[in-house]
Image (cartoon, rainbow, N blue to C red):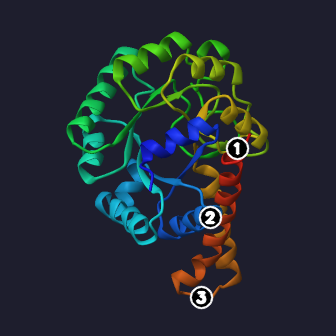
Amino acid sequence: MKTLRETIGWAKENKIAVGHFNISTLDQLSGIFQAARALTAPVIIGVSEGERDFIGIHQSVALIRSLREQYDYPIFLNADHTYSVERCKEAVDAGFDSVIFDGAKLSMEENIKATRAVVEYARASGRDMLVEGELGYIGSSSEVRDALPAGAALAEGELTTVADAQRFVAETGIDLFSPAIGSVHGMLRSMPDPDLNIGRLAEIAAAVKTPLVLHGASGLRDENVAEAIRSGISLVHISTELRVAWRNAVKLSLQQQEDEVAPYKILRPAVTEVEKVAEKKLALFNAKV
């Protein structure tokens, strides 16, 4: 079985992308894993600080490790959007496969210093753990919005520049890099999110050898995501669309089974709907675009 580093390298070489999906419940994990196995696609499960506090840090590791070992399957665990060096160290010590230090709101100098500290700690662990860094603020929560998040880098002059990308990658030593190229966390309620700046993405991809990550892909047009993968994205994050599918399925299930009290019966439709979304996304990411 390929390691996570090998898996992302393989995706980069083949101009496809690995899917990253966030969970906070076991039924969400079941739906995503079933979708991945149906397509024989590698998959990364993400748990943010809040999600891993809810599930349990060591319990998150045990869940993913058990699936990987039982099925001999390339499923990996990422400590998503981690805002302090200490919490990144916690993920390293717990046995996560990767961790993201999110210093997007910090100055360049502060972001570099903190991200480099995480990289050094991960290297010292003796495990081949990947560290991702982010440059450029794109919002901070998975919400269905009526307007784009305030302060998100959307205008061309606000996006990550090639020079900044090169400096950030070189001075931090990160394994994965997430630049601001026009995406936002969450999704708009009544229309697709604005398209990514593919030109800026292509420029960064040509200048930086580190695999590139797209956050905030929920709500983007499929064609725009496919173009981003063709232009250099090797890892795509989806959260809000899964959460919406899960919530709608649970709401409908409760309405249709008013007297049901067994959680596993109530949640079965949620597994199915999450699986549908994940399978559609994985098929898109793994297409020969």
Tell me the kind of residue under disc 2. Ala
How far apart are the alpha carbons under marks 2 and 3? Answer: 27 Å
Tell me the kind of residue under disc 1. Gly
Residue 94: tell me if it is visible: yes
| Mark 2 element type | helix
For the N terminus, the image quarter is bottom left
Question: Pointer 1: residues within 10 angstroms few (<14), some, or many (20+)?
Answer: many
Determine whether label 1 and label 2 are within 8 Å by CB: no
| Mark 3 element type | loop
Residue 169 spot, x, y in % from top left: 42, 21
The residue singled out by tag 2 in the image is 35
Residue closer to the observer: 219 or 58 = 58
Residue 178 spot, x, y in % from top left: 51, 30
How far apart are the alpha carbons under marks 1 and 2? Answer: 20 Å
Residue 117 spot, x, y in % from top left: 26, 28
Residue closer to the observer: 251 or 223 = 223
Tell me the kind of residue under disc 3. Glu
Question: Pointer 3: residues within 10 angstroms few (<14), some, or many (20+)?
Answer: few
Residue found at x 23% / y 49%: 93
Q: Quadrant of residue 217?
A: top right
The residue singled out by tag 1 in the image is 219
Q: Quadrant of residue 267?
A: bottom right
Question: Pointer 2: residues within 10 angstroms few (<14), some, or many (20+)?
Answer: many
The residue singled out by tag 3 in the image is 260
Residue closer to the observer: 192 or 40 = 40
**Left or right: 2 with respect to 149?**
left
Q: Is residue 96 above or below residue 145?
A: below
Q: Quadrant of residue 68?
A: bottom left
Determine whether label 2 and label 3 are within 8 Å by CB: no
How far apart are the alpha carbons under marks 1 and 3? Answer: 33 Å
| Mark 1 element type | loop
